[in-house]
């Protein structure tokens, strides 16, 4: 005789949101403990303690420096990422839906995606100056490529059987694209948005370092060059917090949009 087999699929309940939150908090606590241990071990001044970093954050907030720099960086980041989404999703979808157009331009898109964005910074500065336009363009160039390419790949991975079934019911080409192709491309699209948001945040700091030194990137350079490591860690943690917030927001968006997908789709 054989014993009962472990249940798979629906029979096994996934970890709840509360469990995940507790695990994340426990992991965060471990990181803080390791941070405190490292600060106590290395020579003084190289790594600030968590307490010193909190005090530096309080000081920067009371002086208004952190809020001002954060606002500048968020404007740059939001403008560039928003433009990348508005351009990247329609262009990637068009490349996937119109095969001739996609096969014509994809080689140029791949070539541009493989080119380091830093190479365009001098040209951007010459054309747009050192203001918000140049910074947003640097963010845009970094964020738009993964959005285009993942949307393109998602539309190309469409389920031809579902499309034929929809056609057999008399669905128009437009309805097929909206109700079959785009919902099927949703997982690819969300991955593209996550990658674009991450690269866009990195390019925000790069833009603020290469153009007029301002925002969180400017403070990062200032405190790094003057070895004010407590303040430096505050800026690093602020950037990490932005990344976490954006990533979790996209995760929630994916959950909302998943209702749009067809039942039974993977």
Image (cartoon, helix red, strand yellow):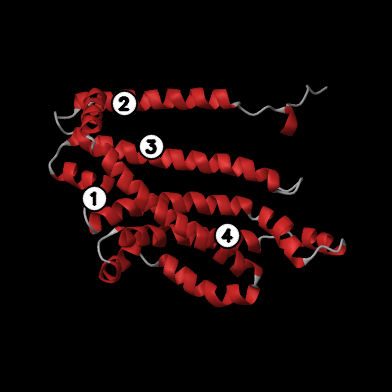
Say if mark 2 contacts mark 4, CB within 8 Å.
no
Q: Nearer the viewer, residue 175 or 51?
A: 175
Mark before the other along the chain sequence, 2 or 1: 2
Q: Nearer the viewer, residue 107 or 101?
A: 101
Disc 4 marks which residue? 151
Dot 2: within a 10 Å radius of its alpha carbon, few (fewer than 14), some, or many (20 or more) residues? few
Residue 112 is situated, as x and y percent measured from the top left of the image, at 43, 69
The disc label shown at residue 27, or none: none
Mark before the other along the chain sequence, 3 or 2: 2
Say if mark 3 contacts mark 1, CB within 8 Å.
no
Q: Nearer the viewer, mark 2 or mark 1?
A: 1
Q: Residue at x 53, y 27 (%)?
A: 20
Say if mark 4 contacts mark 1, CB within 8 Å.
no
Q: Nearer the viewer, mark 2 or mark 4?
A: 4
Disc 2 marks which residue? 34
Q: Is residue 45 left or right of residue 10?
A: left
Disc 1 marks which residue? 214
The N terminus, quarter of image = top right
Q: Vertically, is 77 above or below 3?
A: below
Q: Vertically, is 37 above or below 82?
A: above
Classify residue 32 by image quadrant: top left
Classify residue 256 by image quadrant: top right
């Amino acid at each position: 005789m054989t014993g009962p087999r472990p249940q798979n699929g629906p029979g096994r309940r996934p970890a709840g949101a509360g469990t995940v939150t507790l695990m994340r908090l426990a992991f965060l606590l471990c990181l803080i403990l390791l941070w405190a241990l490292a600060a106590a071990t290395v020579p003084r001044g190289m790594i600030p303690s968590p307490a010193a970093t909190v005090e530096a954050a309080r000081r920067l907030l009371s002086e208004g420096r952190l809020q001002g720099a954060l606002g500048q960086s968020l404007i740059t980041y939001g403008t560039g990422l928003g433009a990348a989404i508005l351009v990247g999703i329609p262009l990637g979808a068009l490349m996937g839906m119109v095969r001739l157009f996609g096969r014509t331009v994809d080689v140029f898109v791949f070539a541009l995606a493989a080119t380091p964005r830093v190479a365009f910074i001098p040209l951007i500065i010459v054309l747009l100056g050192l203001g918000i336009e140049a910074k947003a363009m640097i963010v845009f160039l970094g964020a738009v490529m993964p959005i285009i390419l993942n949307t393109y790949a998602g539309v190309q991975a469409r389920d031809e059987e579902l499309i034929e079934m929809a056609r057999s019911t008399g669905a128009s080409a437009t309805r097929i694209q909206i109700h079959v192709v785009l919902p099927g491309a949703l997982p690819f699209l969300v991955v593209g948005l996550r990658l674009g948001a991450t690269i866009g945040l990195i390019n925000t700091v790069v833009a603020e370092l290469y153009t007029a030194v301002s925002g969180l990137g400017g403070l990062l350079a200032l405190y790094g060059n003057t070895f004010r490591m407590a303040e430096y860690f505050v800026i690093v943690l602020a950037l990490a917090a932005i990344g976490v917030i954006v990533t979790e927001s996209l995760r929630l968006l994916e959950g909302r949009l998943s209702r749009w997908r067809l039942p039974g789709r993977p």
